[in-house]
Amino acid sequence: MVIPPPVKPPRIMKFLKPYVLKMHFTNKFVNAQVIHSPTATVASAASSQEKTLRSTMESTRDVAAAAMIGKILGERLLLQDIPAVTVFLKRDQKYHGKVKAVIDSLREVEGNIWAIPLYLPIPLECPGGPAENRPKGLSGFINALSLFLDPDL
């Protein structure tokens, strides 16, 4: 008699949006792209190397350039009807400086794109209000996730 393996609960990654924001910073330029992970294709991208953007920027590598790239990327995502992305930070990237500028300007786009950190699957600007007013623990996580996945909001 063969005993089947136990059924594992679905991973939380299946419930997150399939679009992943990846950022790359060089000494001269800022690049950001959103990848559709199931198909491994680039959904949208923005870079300070683009000729139309280079002429409007003072510098192509500072925090202001990163904020502009985040804003442009957010507008392009809204044109493609992508309401939320998951943020993938490399090991050496911290939520500070250029990374923070890209993510915050992506969130501040008029259509309110939700940028969800991969290590914290609760939106920072969720409809439940500020972080201090939301319930903590597993119940808070489930409430935030249900609000995030509800298409009626």
Image: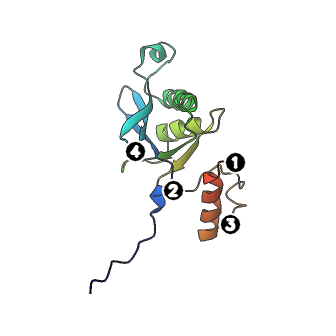
Asked where in the image residue 133 lies, by quadrant, the reply is bottom right
Q: CA distance from mark 1 to mark 3?
A: 22 Å
Q: Earlier in the sequence, mark 1 or mark 3?
A: 3
Front tag of 3 and 2: 2
Q: Regarding mark 4 in the picture, which secondary structure is present there?
A: loop
Give the amino acid type for the residue marked by disc 2 in the picture. Phe
Q: Earlier in the sequence, mark 1 or mark 4?
A: 4
Q: Which mark is residue 15?
A: 2
Discs 3, 4 touching: Cβ within 8 Å: no
Q: Regarding mark 2 in the picture, which secondary structure is present there?
A: loop
Asked if 91 appears above or below 97 in the picture, the reply is below
Q: Using a 10 Å C-alpha cutoff, classify the residue at mark 4 as few (fewer than 14 neighbours), some (14 to 19) or many (20 or more).
A: few
Q: Regarding mark 1 in the picture, which secondary structure is present there?
A: loop
Asked where in the image residue 107 lies, by quadrant, the reply is top right
Give the amino acid type for the residue marked by disc 1 in the picture. Asp
Front tag of 3 and 4: 4
- In the rendered image, which quarter contains the N terminus? bottom left
Q: Which residue is mark 4?
A: 37
Q: Residue at x 33, y 77 (%)?
A: 5
Q: How many marks?
A: 4
Q: CA distance from mark 1 to mark 2?
A: 17 Å
Q: Which residue is mark 3?
A: 135
Q: Residue at x 70, y 51 (%)?
A: 127
Closer to the camera in the image, 16 or 96: 16
Q: CA distance from mark 1 to mark 4?
A: 25 Å
Q: Earlier in the sequence, mark 3 or mark 4?
A: 4
Q: Which residue is mark 1?
A: 152
Q: Which mark is residue 38?
A: none
Q: CA distance from mark 3 to mark 2?
A: 20 Å
Image coords of residue 136 (percent x, y): 64, 67
Closer to the camera in the image, 87 or 11: 11
